[in-house]
Image (cartoon, rainbow, N blue to C red):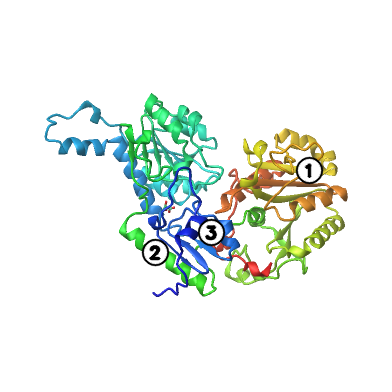
């Protein structure tokens, strides 16, 4: 297949679009990539090394190669786990050394079969690791932002640990398979390592920055944990005098999780398919959903789909980018062909619930008009209370917002009159007002609401206060990337308050994923439209 490559990436541009990690030298040749004028086609699933907003701001798309890397990455996870447990590298050295005449005590390994494997990050790769662990009769625990379906859990015999600490305390092997995001950066530090068993092994096939490496060095030196097996570090490669390289209980491979011929061919094929589609102006098959602004919309999808809500109307307005598509919640071929539009209203009469799903971006110059339209619709409909589901860029949190839960709420005075006790009981955290100029104290400037990435959320909340509407905002700090797990977090949070699911499902947090989510990876709207 020939790719009309119009310009290859120059090293200087590469270093601009590539995020530099602490102490790292950026080498243009180190990854399979190609830049064509429309797309940065990344080889591999992780795009944490790319400055996606900057690249997108140039009108260039970013694509990746999810799915095809999962088997090989899960394989290296198991390879590291087994090699560390059974001291394969040390055994090889002993076998090769003519001076050694007996098997040293230090070659005594730990048993893998029937031990406990704790997987942190149960996406595609984590799940493949669970399948492999099942083959070794391992007891499997997992921690993930959202719980997997009961069917998925049963298929590999995995038990969900809502609290990561429980997994850390119980596991013989802790396997890291998360994406690198602000939430997972240094996820494993002193405290987490000290919860692990002294006989436990840490295996990392995700990204080096998920582990606080200084804390890991100390834990390995002091015997807090038995060993570590790492395919990823920071930087890569480690400086030759790095303390990790001098420890006997560390096994390191040079980020070769996807490094098999078969997977490399599949990755390159996917990169080419993505690039060709982008150059032709078509939907690139693997363009990660990168807008945090999608999270509220996805959460609403789960509600409408799970509660089987009826479509009762739509809002027709020139404030939204016009678009139309098939029924996102289709249950059969017939209703799949129904035409659906950007702003539709669904109801569940028995729950006295109406939902407005906004699917299209708001035309920037018409955002005030759209807010006014929403306020008058809420008033005219006589809703007793309204909840807005939204999200905000995690990386723009200020210091006080960094710790603890990423979930926040806002409530208008009118809503507080009736729901203040309920909110207090839930123990929710109110969205903090932040300084207009972080780091600078100015007695004259009031802290203000700042919801970057949240679209009209802030304006709608402010209008609702002025108009005396009973309205709450539920939002989540999250990052660009695959934001499906964020949607689950948000909708579960809403459910803690409104108990939407209680009469609909015997399983906790069992939401029905609409068929349209198969299409979530795809190109966004051309920026020129805004
Ligand atoms: O992200 C991935 O898929 C691998 O780490 C290769 O970069």
Query: Height in image: 170 above or below 483?
Result: above
Q: Secondary structure at mark 3?
A: loop
Q: Residue at x 37, y 33 (%)?
A: 243
Residue 381: percent from the left, percent from the top? Answer: 84, 57
Residue 345: percent from the left, percent from the top? Answer: 74, 61
Please give the residue where the numbered disc 3 appears in the rendered image: 288
Please give the residue where the numbered disc 2 appears in the rendered image: 268
Q: Secondary structure at mark 2?
A: helix
Q: Kindly indicate the quadrant of the structure image that contains residue 65.
A: bottom left
Q: Is residue 489 left or right of residue 171?
A: right
Q: Residues within 10 Å of mark 3 (few under 14, many from 20)?
A: many
Q: Are marks 2 and 1 in contact (CB under 8 Å)?
A: no
Q: Secondary structure at mark 1?
A: strand
Q: Is residue 118 left or right of residue 508?
A: left
Q: Residues within 10 Å of mark 2 (few under 14, many from 20)?
A: some
Q: Residue at x 64, y 46 (%)?
A: 396
Disc 2 within 8 angstroms of ligand 1 (CB)? no
* Of the pair 114 and 294, the residue shown nearer to us: 294
For the residues labelled 2 and 1, the Cα–Cα distance comes to 49 Å
Q: Is residue 265 visible to us here?
A: yes
Q: Kindly indicate the quadrant of the structure image that contains residue 98.
A: top left
**Nearest-to-viewer mark from 3 and 1:** 3
């Amino acid at each position: 297949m020939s790719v009309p490559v119009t310009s290859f990436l120059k090293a200087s541009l590469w270093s601009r679009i590539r995020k530099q990690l602490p102490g790292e030298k950026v080498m243009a040749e180190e990854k399979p990539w190609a830049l064509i004028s429309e797309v940065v086609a990344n080889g591999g699933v992780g795009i944490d090394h790319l400055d996606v907003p900057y690249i997108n701001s140039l009108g260039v798309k970013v694509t990746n190669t999810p799915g095809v890397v999962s088997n090989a990455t899960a394989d290296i996870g198991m390879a590291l786990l087994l090699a560390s447990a059974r001291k394969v590298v040390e055994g090889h050295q002993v076998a090769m050394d003519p001076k050694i005449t007996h098997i040293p005590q230090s070659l005594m390994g730990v048993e893998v079969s029937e031990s406990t494997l704790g997987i942190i990050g149960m996406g595609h790769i984590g799940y493949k690791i669970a399948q492999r662990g099942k083959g070794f009769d391992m007891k499997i625990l997992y921690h993930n932002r959202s719980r997997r379906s009961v069917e998925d859990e049963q298929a590999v015999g995995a038990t969900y640990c809502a609290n990561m600490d429980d997994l850390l305390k119980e596991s013989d092997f802790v396997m890291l398979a998360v994406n690198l995001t602000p939430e997972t950066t240094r996820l494993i530090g002193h405290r987490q390592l000290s919860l692990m068993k002294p006989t436990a092994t840490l295996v990392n096939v995700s990204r080096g920055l998920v582990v606080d490496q200084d804390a890991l060095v100390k834990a390995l030196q002091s015997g807090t944990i038995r060993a570590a097996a790492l395919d990823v570090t920071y930087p890569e490669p480690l400086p030759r005098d790095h303390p990790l390289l001098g420890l006997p209980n560390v096994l390191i491979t040079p980020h070769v999780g996807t490094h098999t011929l078969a997977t490399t061919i599949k990755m390159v094929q996917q990169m080419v398919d993505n690039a060709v589609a982008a150059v032709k102006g078509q939907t690139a098959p693997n363009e990660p959903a990168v807008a945090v602004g999608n999270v509220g919309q996805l959460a609403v999808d789960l509600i409408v789909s799970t509660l089987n809500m009826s479509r009762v109307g739509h809002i027709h307005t020139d404030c939204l980018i016009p678009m139309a598509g098939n029924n996102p919640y289709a249950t059969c071929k017939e209703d799949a062909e129904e035409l659906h539009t950007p702003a539709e209203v669904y109801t569940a009469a028995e729950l006295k619930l109406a939902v407005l799903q906004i699917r299209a971006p708001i035309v920037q110059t018409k955002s005030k008009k759209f807010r006014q339209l929403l306020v008058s619709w809420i008033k005219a409909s006589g809703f007793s209370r309204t909840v807005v589901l939204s999200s905000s860029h995690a990386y723009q949190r200020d210091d006080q917002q960094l710790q603890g839960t990423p979930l926040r709420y806002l409530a208008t005075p009118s809503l507080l009159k009736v729901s203040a006790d309920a909110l207090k009981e839930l123990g929710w955290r109110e969205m903090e007002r932040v300084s207009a100029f972080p780091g600078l104290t100015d007695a004259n400037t009031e802290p203000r609401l700042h919801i970057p990435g949240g679209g009209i959320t802030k304006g709608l909340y402010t209008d609702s206060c002025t108009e005396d509407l009973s309205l709450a905002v539920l939002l989540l700090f999250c990052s660009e990337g695959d934001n499906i797990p964020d949607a689950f977090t948000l909708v579960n949070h809403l459910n803690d308050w409104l108990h939407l699911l209680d009469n609909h499902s015997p399983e906790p947090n069992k939401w029905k994923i609409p068929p349209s989510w198969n299409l979530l990876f795809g190109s966004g709207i051309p920026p020129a439209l805004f």
